[in-house]
Every structure is written in C-alpha cells, then in structure tokens.
Image: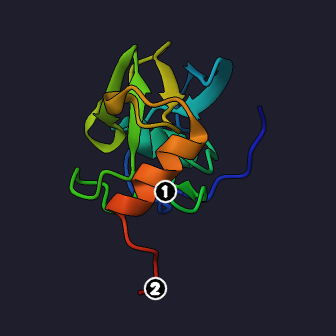
Amino acid sequence: MSIDSLFEPLAGAGAEASAPVSVTIIFNGEQVRVPMAASVAAALLAGGIKHFRRSPVSGQGRVPYCMMGVCFECLLEIDGVPDRRACLVPLTPQMTIRTQDILPEAGIGSDELALTLAHAMEPPHGQ
C-alpha cells in the first residue's frame, strides 16, 4: 500500500531524522511499512494513512487532532482491543490495527441505525 504522507517530521528533529527506521504493521488486514515513531498515531500519519475513523454523522474520514488523548479522533482497534487512543499507544512491530467505522460499544452494525443515533448525539458541524 503506497500512500503519500500528510505528516512529515521536521528536518534535524532528532538523531534518526535522516534515516528513520521502519517497521511492518497490519492495518485493516494489509501489511503496511510505517516509520518507527513514538505512538501508533504518529507512525500512521507519517506512513500516509489518511483516515483513522469515519464520522458517524457525515461519513467523512477523521484523523488525530490533538495528539495528546483529549479529542478521541484517533480511536482504533489495536491488537484486538477496541477504542484505543492511538496517540497514547506506543508503536511495536507487527501490531494489528483496524479502523472503527461503527459504534461497537452499542453493538450496532447497521449503517442506518448508527447514523440515526449519531444524529441524535452530535449536532451538525458549523451550527
């Protein structure tokens, strides 16, 4: 999977800035090479992953916003554990990571029901 990165480390921002070490992880069932970064979120962003979850209201892809565990935009299933904040989880080689595009805590798999519940819980953006 080859994807252009939306995130790049600053030049000279660390000892390994010139040649970052990369590791293989499993992302949504596919092997992906990502830079060895401090957190899963940082590695996925640097590796070019363009969405971590989808908004239940608009269906648009979402990516981490705060990178410190406050906004919950980086929720992923990591090694079989759902609702992990990827910005707080250290990256290790061979992690299995999946996006969460449904509401697993409510046991909802139907897109229509999830959308109805999401509209009830989240006001439309821009209002």
Q: Which residue is mark 1?
A: 9
Residue drawn at (36%, 64%) of the image:
122
Residue 14 screen position, x and y as percent = 37, 50
Q: Which mark is residue 94?
A: none
User: Does residue 22 appear in this view?
Assistant: yes
Q: Nearer the viewer, residue 30 or 46?
A: 30
Task: Identify the residue at image location x=58%, y=49%.
Answer: 51
Determine the secondary structure under disc 2: loop
**Residue 24: image location, x then y, percent:** 58, 19
Quarter of the view holding residue 119: bottom left
Q: Amino acid at mark 1?
A: Pro
Q: Nearer the viewer, mark 2 or mark 1?
A: 2
For the question of whether residue 16 can be seen, the reply is no
Left or right? Give the position of 123 relative to 49.
left
The residue under label 2 is 126
Is the C-beta separation of discs 2 and 1 under 8 Å? no
Q: How is the image coloured?
A: rainbow
- Amino acid under label 2? Gly
Left or right of 88? Residue 14 is: right
Please tell me whether residue 109 is drawn above or below residue 92 in the rendered image. Answer: below
Q: Whole-percent x and y of residue 93? A: 46, 16
Residue sitting farthest toward the right: 2
Residue 80 to residue 66: above or below:
above
Observer-nearest of 67 and 15? 67
Compare marks 2 and 1 and give the one earlier in the sequence: 1
Q: Is residue 33 above or below residue 79?
A: below
Q: Residue furthest bottom?
A: 127
Image position, residue 61 (x, y; %): 59, 55
Q: Quadrant of residue 29?
A: top right
For label 2, count other residues whose C-alpha is less than 10 Å away and answer few (under 14), some (14-19) or many (20+): few
Tag 1 secondary structure: loop
On the rendered image, what quadrant is the N terminus found in? top right
